[in-house]
Amino acid sequence: MRTKILTIVFLIGILSGMNAQDNVDQNEMVGFACYFAGQPSKTVEKVTKKLNTKKYNSIAKLLTSDNNAERYMAVISLEKLAELNKYKLNETEKNLISEIKKSDELVSICSGCTYFEKVSLKELLTEKKKLFAKNWLNRNFKTE
């Protein structure tokens, strides 16, 4: 009887996790520690590689991407680079960032095994939500 109860609880947990993931777009996902292994999403990996190789212009091109996750990552990366005087934003980039910060377009986010959600770019780029990316920003933008 105990085994049956444990099996049922386990299956409910798996099905709940699968339902949470159904409403997100894995191609447009931002996550710094997703799933059981705590892996970054593909978009986060892509932007991290560009940062590590100092391809800042390539990151700036993501501001016009059709992929909302790429646009989010471009905004937080370029703003941090500008803050550290490692990249100078031009007027077009500043305007694009401003538009993205007002956007109601949705981006999927994940954290851990069970947290999957879609939020607007506008919401994700608020001061309150900046904590979502804080560890990644600190790790990738160490001040020398």
Image (spheres, helix red, strand yellow):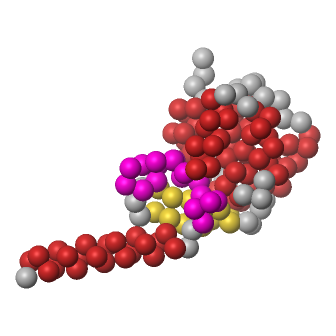
Is residue 126 placed above or below 89 in the rendered structure? below
Using the rendered view, name the quadrant where residue 138 is placed.
Answer: top right
84 and 7: which is toward the camera: 7
Q: Where in the figure is residue 66, as x and y percent of width and height? A: 77, 59
Q: Residue at x 24, y 76 (%)?
A: 9
Using the rendered image of the protein, determine whether residue 107 is visible from the camera's viewpoint: yes
Q: Where in the figure is residue 142, as x and y percent of width and height? A: 57, 25
44 horizontally vs 21: left or right: right
Position of the C terminus, as image quadrant, is top right
Using the rendered view, name the quadrant where residue 109 is placed.
Answer: bottom right
Q: Residue at x 51, y 58 (%)?
A: 110
Q: Where in the figure is residue 139, as x and y percent of width and height? A: 53, 32
Residue furthest to the top: 144
**Count of numbered marks:** 0
Residue furthest to the left: 1
Is residue 54 placed above or below 91 in the rendered structure? above
Is residue 114 placed above or below 61 in the rendered structure? below
Q: Where in the figure is residue 67, as x and y percent of width and height? A: 72, 58
127 horizontally vs 9: left or right: right
114 horizontally vs 90: left or right: left
Q: Residue at x 64, y 59 (%)?
A: 28
Residue span colored magenta: 25-41
Position of the N terminus, as image quadrant, is bottom left
